[in-house]
């Protein structure tokens, strides 16, 4: 996750670039208080973005300053960045972060599907379709660089 920069070399604030998927939170924060980051993946993958936010450095260590619940599935494509917007805090040292889970595949996915089918006593879900993917696991965090603005 890297800080977005305008074409003139300054911090982001202009319109989203081509090959960048804009963030829905772009509208929530005032342009003077908003900071944009770009998240890119080297491979096509999917993540379940639980939350994004800002941490500030205190004498006790990094503490959460603000957090936005997202609950979104992001399909990341190589060569296409995702924009992440956060509100700049009034702190001497801060960083942005994302909390997410990765898509289950292989044996862990089969195990989760079989467990759910066993609990429901059915190999179909409420729509009548066979159980598919869309299971997420892990409690991963991704941090930006530290800023002193």
Image (cartoon, rainbow, N blue to C red):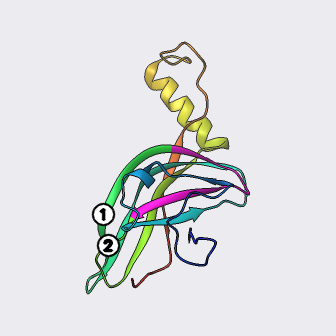
Question: In the picture provided, is 136 more to the left or to the right than 59?
Answer: right
Looking at the rendering, the stretch of residues picked out in magenta corresponds to 73-86
Quadrant in which the C terminus is drawn: bottom left
Query: Which one is nearer the viewer's eye here, 117 or 84?
Result: 84
Residue 131 picture location, percent across and down: 58, 24
Q: Reading the chain from its start, which is encountered first: label 2 or label 1?
A: 1
- At x 52%, y 69%, the residue is 12
Query: Which mark, by number, is residue 129?
Result: none
Contact, mark 2 vs mark 1 (Cβ under 8 Å): yes
Relative vertical location of residue 9 with respect to residue 137 in this rendering, above or below: below
Q: Can you name the residue that lies furthest to the top here?
A: 128
Predominant secondary structure, magenta span:
strand
- At x 50%, y 31%, the residue is 115
**Quadrant of residue 2 in the image?**
bottom right
- At x 43%, y 81%, the residue is 147
Residue 62 picture location, percent across and down: 33, 77
Question: In the picture provided, is 10 more to the left or to the right than 56?
Answer: right
Callout count: 2
Is 75 included in the stretch rendered in magenta? yes
* Secondary structure at numbered mark 2: loop
**Quadrant of residue 132 in the image?**
top right
Question: In the picture provided, is 24 more to the left or to the right than 102?
Answer: left
- At x 53%, y 63%, the residue is 14
What separation in Å lies between label 2 and label 1 (alpha carbons)? 8 Å
Question: In the picture provided, is 14 more to the left or to the right than 76?
Answer: left
Residue at image mark 2: 89
Residue at image mark 1: 66
Is 85 included in the stretch rendered in magenta? yes
Residue 93 picture location, percent across and down: 36, 83
* Secondary structure at numbered mark 1: strand
Q: Residues within 10 Å of mark 1 (few under 14, many from 20)?
A: some
Query: Which one is nearer the viewer's eye here, 118 or 97?
Result: 97
């Amino acid at each position: 996750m890297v800080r977005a920069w305008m074409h003139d070399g300054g911090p982001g604030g202009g319109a989203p670039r081509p090959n960048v998927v804009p963030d829905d939170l772009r509208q929530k924060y005032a342009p003077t208080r908003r900071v944009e980051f770009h998240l890119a993946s080297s491979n096509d993958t999917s993540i379940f973005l639980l939350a994004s936010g800002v941490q500030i450095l205190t004498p006790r260590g990094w503490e959460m300053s603000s957090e936005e619940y997202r609950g979104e599935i992001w399909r990341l494509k190589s060569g296409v960045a995702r924009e992440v917007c956060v509100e700049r805090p009034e702190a001497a040292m801060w960083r942005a972060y994302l909390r997410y889970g990765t898509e289950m595949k292989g044996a862990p996915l089969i195990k989760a599907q079989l467990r759910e089918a066993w609990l429901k006593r059915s190999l179909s879900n409420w729509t009548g379709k066979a159980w598919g993917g869309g299971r997420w696991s892990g409690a991963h965090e991704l941090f930006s660089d530290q800023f002193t603005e």
